[in-house]
Image: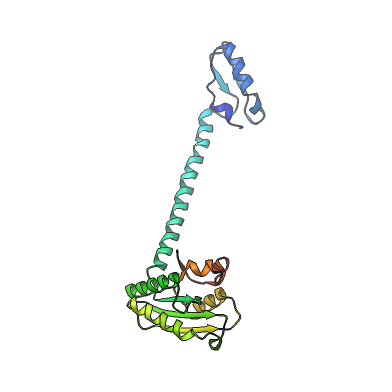
Amino acid sequence: MAFAHYLVAVPTEPSILTKAALFSTSAAAASPPLSFNKNHSDLTFSSTSLKTKARKLSIFPRFRRIGQKVTAKAKESEVSLAAEAFTNFKHLLFPITDTNPYLSEGTREAAATAAALAKKYGADITVVVIDERQKESFPEHETRMSSIRWHLAEGGFQEFKLLERLGEGSKPTAIIGEVADDLNLDLVVISMEAIHSKHVDANLLAEFIPCPVLLLPL
């Protein structure tokens, strides 16, 4: 508010001038005093002129414009990097935490999406099956594996790497991050169903997954 009175148009009539002087009193401590002649027809500053102050004030809009340009370029760079990450991947991960031996709707959709993306961009697929139970304690384990092969083949992708992480006692999110890191993968494709079923912790995805994650809505 120190510059408020500089922006006020001060009239030259003596009676109105008194009111204007009262209006500018709140900023008087930080402002140069006004002096006027006997006829009240001219107003002058005892220190710096209005033009000098105007030039100083005009610097700030310029700084704002420069700041906006820098911010815009930074955002464009981030968007470009994100777009590149989703179009230049060569190896994607398809984690399965589904206990349904015939695969749930969300897992089938994720399988179809992974196959379509890999086929379009010439990428490889690694499937990791995660279950807290050992193979021996899940009689329908082979049925589940056959379902995975069938759905990926339906998407036009018959050759893929298959990993089984069974009965390890580790959190599925940590296992997904470990596999993605060890194999230097470019993208993880997973259904939101895995999160809704509490198999995968959404809060830990950013901590454990070292690459972009494509979450498919239900």
> 76 or 116, which is in the foreground?
116
> 217 or 63, which is in the foreground?
217
Looking at the image, residue 217 lies above or below residue 18: below
Quarter of image, res 35: top right
With 73 as the anchor, is 165 left or right in this view? Answer: right
With 23 as the anchor, is 177 left or right in this view? Answer: left
Task: Provide residue 84's location: percent of width, then percent of height.
Answer: 39, 66
Residue sitting at the far front: 139
Task: Provide residue 31's location: percent of width, then percent of height.
Answer: 62, 29
Can residue 175 be seen here? The reply is: yes
> 13 or 152, which is in the foreground?
152
> 120 or 195, which is in the foreground?
195
Looking at the image, residue 45 lies above or below residue 176: above
With 102 as the anchor, is 157 left or right in this view? Answer: left
Placement of the C terminus among the 4 image quadrants: bottom left
Task: Provide residue 152's location: percent of width, then percent of height.
Answer: 37, 78
Image point (59%, 11%), residue name: 15
Disc tally is 0
With 25 as the anchor, is 123 left or right in this view? Answer: left
Image point (46%, 79%), residue name: 101
